Amino acid sequence: MFFVFLILALLVVYLQPVFFPRQAQTIRPHESQATGEGTITNMQADPVAAEGFATEIGSSLKDFEKTHGAPIISYDSGYGFTISRYETEETGFLEVNSEDGKVVAIKSTGIDGQEIAPFSLNMSMGDLAAITMLFPNFTIDDEGAEIQIELMEEDLNYRPLLVFDNGVYGILFFNRNSELYGVMYLTKDMLLKLAPYNLISGEVPAMKAQATEWGEINQAKIDQGFQLLNALRLQEELPLYETTYTLQGQGRDFLTRFLKNPQKHLSESRYESFRKVTEDASNEVFIVTGSEFTDLAKAVGVADIQGFFETPCYDLTFQILSWYSDPYMHARFMEEQKQAIAIGISQQNMVILFEDVAETEDSD
């Protein structure tokens, strides 16, 4: 009997990080080729049988569109891949990254059924455990070079990584209630470039800017980001976000003034963190939230505003899906009252502003 209780106790200890989430750290794409410290286990993930969208990675974009129709919009990401968005139900969002006419990533939320099989919307971690086991370590062969990545506890809880039997990777996005709301399917190369997990050994390719004219690219990302955020609001049965020209102007002013002289507006230590992310090979992200953001906004002349700033941000849809999987960030998007938002994009730099909308007698 003693050994029975001992085994049960060990199971609770080792399974707790996966099934009992705690406050998550914000996990974001890494720009660098630097490696971090960590430990490697010999256990590797077992492939999941590829179905639905997982079978369309690597196919031609023309073949994808034979099934899903022509895109609503298609635009250059500025980083070597094209982004195309496709028609879905009102609460859904479907976007594809393509390179040289080939599908390299599919991002979906609010889409259920065969396309995301064997997964399903709102499935729990317990449901996922019935399909596959989660592993923290992955070894990826990149043209003969071995790259090892590690998922932290927060990743396993909210952004687990899977590999399919056709070599495609999948990132599952769970909200703070441990319910699946989105899936991203991607090639090995796209996974290494976005690098959303801890790099233990090896070198990953940096995401390099390839555009010369950013105005239209930035605006396309802003427009599609607004559409995605409202699709997520519909999923939560919350009032849709509004926007105003004034708030949009404040977003542009924030980015222009801050990026012109960031050293002027940050403490010495914070500026060094910002510089490492934007100038050096750094396996980090720079993000400003809460009271620090309020103070920074005031310092650059955009007072009495809430929001957050982040860099680098290469793929806004991937970024938004990641934010929703972070309990702290998810809570920020769950305000029940009407709000206006503005998204500002300047290449890899992103700001989102929030503003309460006053109710009037004429409000719908």
Image (cartoon, grey):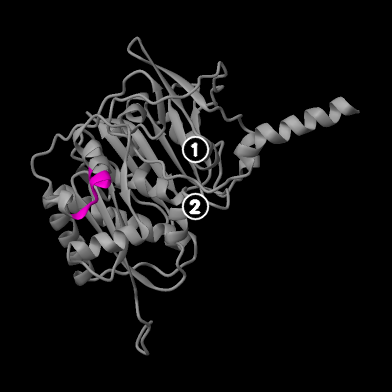
Comes first in the chain, label 2 or label 1: 1
As shown in the figure, which amino acid type bears the numbered disc 2? Pro
Residue farthest toward the front in the current orientation of the protein? 268
Locate residue 246, reporting x and y percent.
19, 71
Q: Vertical placement of 175 versus 44: above or below? A: below
Residue farthest toward the top in the current orientation of the protein? 144
Magenta highlight range:
265-271
Locate residue 359, reporting x and y percent.
38, 83
Report the number of discs: 2
Nearest the camera: 179 or 27? Answer: 27
Q: Vertical placement of 336 versus 329: above or below? A: below
Dot 1 corresponds to which residue?
A: 155
Magenta-drawn stretch contains 12: no
Magenta-drawn stretch contains 268: yes
The residue under the point 19% across, 59% down is 254
The tag on residue 327 is 2
Residue farthest toward the left in the current orientation of the protein? 212
Nearest the camera: 271 or 350? Answer: 271
The residue under the point 20% across, 35% down is 79
As shown in the figure, which amino acid type bears the numbered disc 1? Asp
Nearest the camera: 72 or 205? Answer: 205
Label 2, residues with CA under 10 Å away: few <14, some 14-19, many ≥20: many
Label 1, residues with CA under 10 Å away: few <14, some 14-19, many ≥20: many
Image quarter of residue 89 = bottom left
The residue under the point 24% across, 36% down is 276
Q: Vertical placement of 36 versus 284: above or below? A: above
Kindly state the secondary structure of the residue where label 2 is placed: helix
Residue farthest toward the right in the current orientation of the protein? 1
Q: Is residue 127 visible?
A: no
